Each structure stands twice: as structure tokens, then as C-alpha cells.
Amino acid sequence: MMGNLAALKTSSIRETDEWQLRVDLAAAFRLAAMYDWHEAVANHLSLAVSGDGQKFLMNPRWRHFSRIKASELLLLDSEDRTTMTRPDAPDLTAWSIHGRIHATVPQARCIIHLHPPYATAVASLANPEILPIDQNTARFFNRVAVDMDYGGMANSDAEGERLGRLLGNRQIMMMGNHGVLVCAETVAEAFDLTYYLERACRNLVLAYSTGQKLHVMSPAVAEKTAQEWEADRDQFQSHFEEMKQILDGQDPSYAS
């Protein structure tokens, strides 16, 4: 069975840019389930397949992340107003958030919206700032948008556009009383950012839990560390490729 799936991934029939994007996004869903970042059959990941970002892939409505396959991802158009009337319409909150952000935020090629436990815990604090107390937290110094105006389920275009404006030119948003949103040029980078965001928030929550005073880096050291993270453009790609290799060994059906 594994051999057949491996052949499918490298088949000339499948060797298109969109197919590789499908495989990468499907891998990200499986990895999110592996790390327990998902929320039952909710939460959503999407990936632009057109130059203008208008056409994008997203998960089918209410499909568990651990079962998603590349061939099953929906191909949507952010300007198609008939999308929600289709029999295979996506989840309304997914359409409202991802559809409008793909339409309005150029750098949001891959969008990951999740409720991972530690990042959501930090996003639920009165002060959701990710304080630079170690290398992981310093990666996000002065690089995170914060939404403190949660108003219920994101089920309108207006809410998606509000979130897009608030995100601005940032890649990460702490969504108060809600979760997190991460965007990047590629699935590999978005996955790596999400991984380290959750790790950073875990470190912060554990440090808070001691009740002791935090040893926070100076702004100069935190900024230097963040820039050093940004200068390493190879690590996140290798990280994602390694994780896909792990998936291939466990269950390669994501690429079918």
C-alpha cells in the first residue's frame, strides 16, 4: 500500500504545482492533529493557488484533520458569492475568515487558524503579549498582531475583513478569547511558525505557573534574536520536509 501511495505522489499525472500544494497542505492538517493543535472537526487551514490569492485550497466542512487527504481539499474562489450555497460549501466561519483574508492580505498565501492549548491560553489573558523570556518567545518579539475585540463566531465578511486589517503586514495574530492565526508564503513556513508559536506559549505558561518573576530580555536582545531567527531561511523548510518523512512512515494516505 505504501508503495502505491508513493508512486501516486511522484506520478507524472500528479506533477503539477497545485498537486504539490495539496500534498503540503494535507500534511499540515495531519501534523496539526499529531500535535493536538486541532479542535474536534473545527479549525481551518488554507493555501492560495493563484497569483492574486483569490483561488485557494481549504479543508472540507467538519472533516477531522487526521483523515484529510490532498485530493479532498476544496478549491475555492474568494470572490465567488455562490460558494456558501453549494452542496459542498465549506464551514461558514472558515469562509468568512479565510475567504476575506486571502482576498485582502497579500502575504497570506498559507493561513493557519487553530486553537492550540498553550497559545490559546496566552491569547485568553488580559495581556496576551508573548514576552521574550527565551529564544522561542523572542522569535515573536514585536511581530504579533493582537485582537482584543472578540465578538462571537466569525460568520460574516465584515469580520474577516476586520481581522485582515488588524493583521496588516504581520504574519501572526493572537486572537483574544479565541485562538491564533498564522500566515506565510508557504505551508512549510506557516507550519514552522505555528510549531514555535505553540512551543513559545508553552514556555511562557510554564514560567508564569511558577509564580516567580519572569526574567525578560531587553528589547535590544529580543530584537537581535528575532532577526537571527528570520535570517535562517533553510531551517523551516527542512523541518517541514522531515515531518513529511515521518508522516510517510506512519500513514502516507495524506498524499492521496
Image: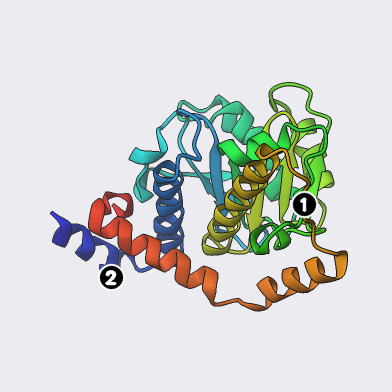
Residue of label 1: 131
Between 3 and 16, the residue placed more toward the observer is: 3
Residue located 69% across and 72% down the image:
230
Quick one: 117 or 165, which is closer to the camera?
Answer: 117
Kind of residue at badge 2: Ser
Is residue 163 at all visible to an observer of this figure?
Answer: yes
* Residue at x 40%, y 53% (from the top left corner): 27
Residue at left offset 36%, top offset 61%: 244
| Residue corresponding to mark 2 | 12
The relative height of residue 175 versus residue 62 in the rendered view (above or below) is below
For the residues carrying marks 1 and 2, which lies nearer the camera in this image?
1
Mark 1, Cα crowd under 10 Å, few <14 / some 14-19 / many 20+, is many
- Disc number for residue 2: none
Residue 200: percent from left, percent from top: 63, 52
Quarter of the image that includes the N terminus: bottom left
Q: Residue at x 71, y 52 (%)?
A: 172
Report how far apart the C-alphas of labels 1 and 2 lie in the structure. Answer: 48 Å
Q: Badge 2: few (under 14), some or many (20 or more) residues near its Cα, within 10 Å?
A: few
- Say which element carries label 1: loop
Q: Position of residue 134 (x, y in %)?
A: 68, 60
Give the vertical position of 176 relative to 13 (above or below): above
Task: Choose the circle earlier in sequence order: 1 or 2.
Answer: 2
* Front one among 182 and 125: 125
Q: Quadrant of residue 215?
A: bottom right
- Residue type at mark 1? Leu
Q: Is residue 80 something that shows in the picture?
A: no
Indicate whether 170 appears above or below 231.
Answer: above
Q: Position of residue 255 (x, y in %)?
A: 32, 55
Residue sitting at the far top:
152
**Quarter holding residue 161:** top right
Residue 204: percent from the left, percent from the top? Answer: 67, 47
